[in-house]
Each structure stands twice: as C-alpha cells, then as structure tokens.
Amino acid sequence: MIIVDSDILIWILRGHVDIKEKMTQLVILNNIQLFITPIQISEIYCGIREKERTNTTLFLDSFPCINIDYYTGKLAGEYMRQYKKSHNVTLSDSLIAACCIQNNLKLWTLNKKHYPMLQKDDFIF
C-alpha cells in the first residue's frame, strides 16, 4: 500500500504519460492500493484552476484518504524539530512522512530529498 505525494498527483492530472503508466502498473497489474492524505488534497486545491475543478475532484475522490491523528501529528512535529534547520523540511512533508510511518505505507514521490526522515525502503520507486 502506498501514499501518493502531491507531485505525482499533479503530473497525472497534467497528463504525464510515464507517471500514468506507473500508476496503471501499480493499481491494475500489481493490485496495489494507493492512498492520499488531507495534505495532498489541500496542496492540489490551493493551485487548482477553475476549469480543472470537476476532473480534479473526481480524481482525488477516487483515492482513500488516510487521516491525520494525534500520534501522526506528534511524529511530524519530531521530524520538524529534527530536520527543519538542516534540510528545510516543511510541515506538509513531515505530516506525509509521519502518515507513511504510522500506517506502514510506502511513499511514491519524485521529491525524495524532501523526506530525509524516510529510509530508502520507505519509497516505492
């Protein structure tokens, strides 16, 4: 099971063929379930174009959403404390990483450098 980062979602929404093919491979060929969090939803909606709203909503609604609880927030805070100064880690990325760890999910992202708190095995590609 995998959490899909915002960058991947944006590439898919923009029609990037390679990323769409990887998603098809994961979901259809390998029967892997993909998830998002409220973080990805907020990041996508803050940059949405009005003409994209309907398709974007349908696309995001197709993913189960992992909610953020107390323990995830606490872990994200620890990540911020540890990596904010040295790696300029954002709260959004800390929360996504914490969701992955708390739920034993891998992360699909093209921005691995945003996640110094995760190990190589925590990423899907």
Image (tube, grey):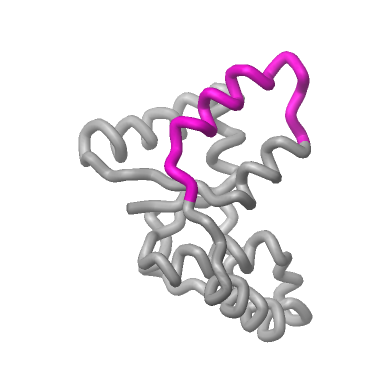
- The prevailing secondary structure element of the residues shown in magenta is helix
- State the image coordinates of residue 32 (x, y, percent, origin top left): 28, 44
**Spot occupied by residue 50 in the image (x, y as percentages of width and height):** 77, 19
Residue lying at the far front of the rendered structure: 70
Q: Which residues are magenta?
A: 47-65
Q: Is residue 23 above or below residue 98?
A: above
Q: Is residue 90 magenta?
A: no
Instruction: From the top left corner, tell me how far across and down residue 6 is, in percent.
Output: 60, 45
Q: Nearer the viewer, residue 61 or 118?
A: 61
Whether residue 59 appears in magenta in the rendering, the answer is yes
- Dividing the picture into quarters, in which one does residue 74 lie? bottom right
- Residue 24: image x %, image y %? 33, 30
Foreground residue, 38 or 21? 38
Q: Is residue 49 above or below residue 28?
A: above
* Residue at the top extreme of this rendering: 51
- Identity of the residue drawn at 63% across and 18% down: 54
Residue shown at 61% from the left, 65% from the top = 95
Which residue is at 63% across, 79% downward? 79
In this rendering, the count of numbered labels is 0
Q: Is residue 34 above or below residue 54?
A: below
